[in-house]
Image: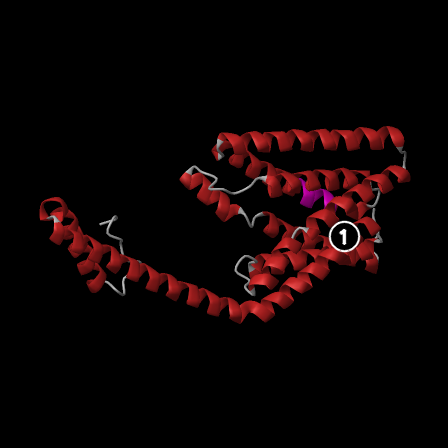
Amino acid sequence: MATFTTDNLWVLTFGVLGNIISIVVFLAPVPTFWRICRRKSTEGFESVPYVVSLFSAMLWLYYASLKSESNAFLLITVNSVGCVIETIYVALYIAYAPKKARMLTLRLLLLNFGGYCSILLLSHFLAKGSARVQLVGWICVALSVAVFAAPLSVIRMVIRTKSVEFMPFSLSFFLMLSAVTWLLYGLFLKDLYVACPNVLGVTFGVLQMALHAIYRKGNTIVMEAENNDTSVVKQSSDIQSCNGHAIASHIDTNVFDEDKEKCERSLIIFIEAPDKGPVATPSEV
């Protein structure tokens, strides 16, 4: 029977918390795929993040299976769930993606499978015992660092635009929370390969939280200004379009009477419904 020391209790605690939070993060794209299924279209979304996440979960699952510690099963559970969820995402993407995107995803999956099998075979024949664990561990660290570094492009966009529109707070918060729990899990388990990449994850998480604190109000102001500008431009274009049709109708009433009538109807809608959301343009009436 396994004995539970204070360290083991902390490992179990943070491991369970890490499982819960990571599964929440895995489920974050569910609304996106619900919309994809409802509209039967991927609408320009890319499959790369889901294929990379699947590859990462597969590698960490292999690494956990090589570990001898009893608490390593928490790595197995979370990455098993991750593999299932990401596989469902990729399958749904392939089902509804256009031909070009579908073929790209299939090629990525083939590359994914080939890379995983290569790592499996090389680690099996080139390393034994603890050396195999170290080899697979460093490969997992390298991949995790690359994944954690991915938000750099989003962070750069936030700083440039002074808007956090493309960096949702809830997702940033849960990613940081996940990195913190797995960092503590790795430290208490004395697992360098789990702890190291999550140091970077915590760093980027804190940076994203700081950017939210700095640019949150600016984002609201920018969004309101954009909405107001869009509304003014749209109203002006509708009026100008209708005026243009009206002027033309005086030149040749036989040709433009119908257009004039449409524009008059659109102007009536425009005047009577200023508070009912977006106003239809003449072409939509």
> Which residues lie in the magenta part?
75-80
- Residue 277 seen in the current view: no
162 left or right of 178 in image: left
- Looking at the picture, how far across and down is residue 99, in whole percent? 50, 29
252 left or right of 135 in image: left
222 left or right of 62 in image: left
**Farthest residue, direction front:** 251
User: At label 1, which amino acid type do we have?
Assistant: Pro
Q: Give the overall secondary structure of the magenta segment.
A: helix
- Looking at the picture, how far across and down is residue 96, in whole percent? 47, 34
136 left or right of 130 in image: left
- Looking at the picture, how far across and down is residue 136, in whole percent? 81, 39
Residue closer to the observer: 134 or 18: 134
Q: Residue at point 59% right, 70% down?
A: 213
- Residue 76 seen in the current view: yes
Residue closer to the observer: 229 or 203: 229
Vertical comparison of 115 with 29: above or below: above
Q: Residue at point 38% right, 64% down?
A: 229
- Looking at the picture, how far across and down is residue 46, in whole percent? 55, 41
Is 269 inside the magenta-drawn segment?
no
Task: State the residue position of label 1.
Answer: 197
Vertical comparison of 285 with 50: above or below: below
Which element is circle 1 on? helix
**Farthest residue, direction left:** 254
Residue closer to the observer: 38 or 104: 104
Vertical comparison of 257 with 89: above or below: below
